[in-house]
Image: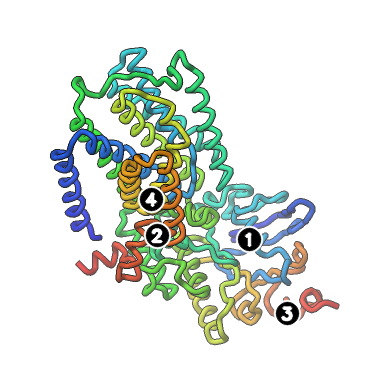
């Protein structure tokens, strides 16, 4: 079953066409990598799908419903959560409070103790349990990325969209992170759409890869198909 | 502070506040009453500026709306001041709702400019609508009590301030308060986790405006003469200074700031025009050495590096 589908999604900023007629699908329960050279439009596609930007053309279908142009908070409630490439934690709030904000908007009727437990659980999941009383500003970049993952998970999404969560990690940490994201998918039944520059990780984790280049879909396929495609090699390395 | 300790400390302070005016003369009592008005103004403005990041310059204008609505109803239509204060609160809330909705998509300086314009327009209307407001002459209004008593007014203002602070405290520590702070910290991120940002902002605006209207209504009936000085920018910036110097975004900060600055203003009144200079100097010193206000200074010298969460508190009990 298709969970997320983009039909000719376009976005332009003034005269700059950041996305032109992007068609893509994300199947339920899969991990899909979104790759492409810098400036290809990956983060713009995230922002357009998740409601931070309104698309200038095309439609976005999520879980069988047309969500084109809905505000980000409404899309979140429908089950889409994301992290940010440049992290955006609630700096002056504690880690626990950061995650609680996500939890209360998923479960506005639940008592405070339930919300706190759920937030704590998500922080433990990403390995930040010890930091729960610290203000988010005090975290380093890697911890902030983890905090954003915990916050996204607390919205109890169907689709988790990750924007470069591996930046700054060493080889061993990368393979742990890949394992972690796979386990999230398996345990929580998530679908993952994942922008990443660390190609090895995407090749290992993803079942399908979408390649963007200059605002267009260059190709989509299995990791093996993608790495061997001359068009992809050309997009990355040039003529 | 944990729940029990907090209640105990608050109760002690409240008891102290109840006894405080008994031994004092008329003038110190007056200073305290005015201070309580400023506590309400600064604390409710803090909800906007400190907790949702909307720096409104229309807060004094809302107090003016409350005061003039109630005053005009009492002076021209003979409506009981208590009912008038309630109506004034509602009118201020409705105007806050409208102004909040108008400023919905505005952030930062644009919101400030729009509310500044609103405040100035209201001021001009009040000064010029002599027939209704009696302009700069001021509108004479009846008091809240049949017999004028400073002590009586003190307790009314104290009760009103305590009521407002309880509402604010509960709000800030509820889910809504978390949403408020999330919006202030990062609107985009707040939206991405499902916070209805526009709704939260308008709600904060409406509640804060209602509170200013309520405080203004009571204050007008205390002064017995409502002048355009209530909805003035002077008063607005005074409230701003109290909140910032006390500690914006903290619960106690505006309360401390309101008392400190209002009492200080009375002390330096003898210097005439120079009191503005002294105020400016204080603001400069605070901005340089205590950017988080007086509360920030206090927090700095507290040993604990992190604030314990409610969860940890529960565990340690």
Q: Is residue A168 above or below residue A46?
A: below
Q: Quadrant of the N terminus of chain A?
A: bottom right
Q: Quadrant of the C terminus of chain A?
A: bottom right
What is the chain identity of the residue bearing mark 4? B
Q: Quadrant of residue A94?
A: bottom left
What is the chain identity of the residue bearing mark 2? A
**Residue A74: numbered disc:** none
| Applied colour scheme | rainbow
- Element type at marker 3? helix
Q: Nearer the viewer, residue A233 or B297?
A: B297
Q: Nearer the viewer, residue A174 or B228?
A: B228
Q: Which residue in the structure is indicated by mark 4?
A: B177
Q: CA distance from mark 4 to mark 1?
A: 29 Å
Count how many numbered circles sit on residues in the image. 4
- Element type at marker 1? helix
**Residue A227: numbered disc:** 3
Q: Which residue in the structure is indicated by mark 1?
A: A46
- Density class for disc 3 (Cα within 10 Å; few <14, some 14-19, many ≥20) is some
Q: CA distance from mark 3 to mark 1?
A: 23 Å
- Density class for disc 1 (Cα within 10 Å; few <14, some 14-19, many ≥20) is many
Q: Is residue A218 above or below residue B291?
A: below
In percent of width and height, residue B62 lies at 43, 32
């Amino acid at each position: 079953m298709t969970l997320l589908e983009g039909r000719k999604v376009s976005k332009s900023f003034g005269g700059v066409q950041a996305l032109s007629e992007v068609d893509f699908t994300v199947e339920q329960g899969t991990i899909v990598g979104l790759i492409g050279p810098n400036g290809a439009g990956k983060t713009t596609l995230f922002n357009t799908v998740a409601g931070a930007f309104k698309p200038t053309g095309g439609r976005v279908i999520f879980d069988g419903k047309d969500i084109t142009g809905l505000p980000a908070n409404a899309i979140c409630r429908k089950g889409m959560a994301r992290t940010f490439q440049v992290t955006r934690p609630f700096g002056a709030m504690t880690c626990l409070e950061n995650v609680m904000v996500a939890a209360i908007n998923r479960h506005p009727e639940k008592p405070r103790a339930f919300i706190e437990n759920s937030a704590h659980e998500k922080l433990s999941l990403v390995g930040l349990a010890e930091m729960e009383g610290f203000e988010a500003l005090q975290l380093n970049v890697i911890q902030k990325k983890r905090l954003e993952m915990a916050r996204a998970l607390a919205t109890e999404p169907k689709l988790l969209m990750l924007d470069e969560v591996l930046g700054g990690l060493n080889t061993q940490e990368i393979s742990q992170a890949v394992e972690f994201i796979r386990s999230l998918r398996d345990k929580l039944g998530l679908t993952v759409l994942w922008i990443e520059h660390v190609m090895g990780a995407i090749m290992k984790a993803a079942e399908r890869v979408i390649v963007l280049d200059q605002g267009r879909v260059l190709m989509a396929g299995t990791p093996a198909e993608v790495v061997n495609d001359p068009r992809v090699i050309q997009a990355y390395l040039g003529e | 502070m944990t729940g029990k300790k907090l209640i105990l400390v608050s109760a002690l302070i409240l008891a102290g506040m109840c006894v405080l005016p008994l031994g004092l003369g008329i003038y110190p009592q007056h200073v305290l009453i005015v201070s309580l008005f400023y506590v309400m103004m600064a604390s409710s403005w803090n909800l906007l500026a400190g907790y949702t990041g909307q720096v409104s310059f229309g807060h004094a204008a809302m107090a003016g709306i409350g005061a003039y609505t109630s005053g005009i109803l009492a002076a021209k239509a003979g409506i009981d001041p208590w009912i008038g204060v309630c109506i004034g609160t509602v009118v201020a809330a409705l105007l806050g709702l409208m102004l909040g909705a108008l400023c919905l998509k505005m952030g930062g300086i644009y919101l400030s400019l729009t509310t500044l314009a609103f405040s100035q327009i209201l001021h001009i209307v009040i000064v010029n609508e002599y027939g209704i407001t009696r302009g700069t002459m001021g509108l004479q209004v009846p008091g809240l009590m049949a017999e004028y008593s400073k002590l009586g007014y003190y307790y009314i203002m104290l009760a009103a301030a305590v009521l407002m602070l309880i509402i604010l405290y509960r709000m800030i520590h509820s889910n809504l308060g978390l949403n408020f702070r999330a919006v202030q910290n990062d609107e985009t991120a707040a939206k991405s986790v499902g916070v209805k940002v526009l709704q939260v902002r308008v709600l904060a605006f409406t509640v804060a405006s209602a509170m200013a209207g309520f405080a203004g209504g009571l204050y007008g009936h205390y002064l017995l003469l409502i002048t355009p000085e209530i909805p003035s920018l002077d008063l607005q910036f005074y409230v701003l200074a109290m909140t910032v110097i006390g500690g914006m975004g903290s619960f106690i900060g505006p309360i401390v700031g309101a008392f400190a600055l209002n009492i200080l203003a009375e002390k330096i009144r003898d210097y005439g025009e120079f009191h503005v200079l002294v105020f400016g100097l204080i603001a400069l010193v605070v901005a340089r050495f205590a950017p988080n206000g007086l509360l920030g200074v206090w927090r700095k010298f507290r040993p604990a590096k992190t604030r314990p969460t409610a969860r940890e508190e529960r565990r340690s009990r």
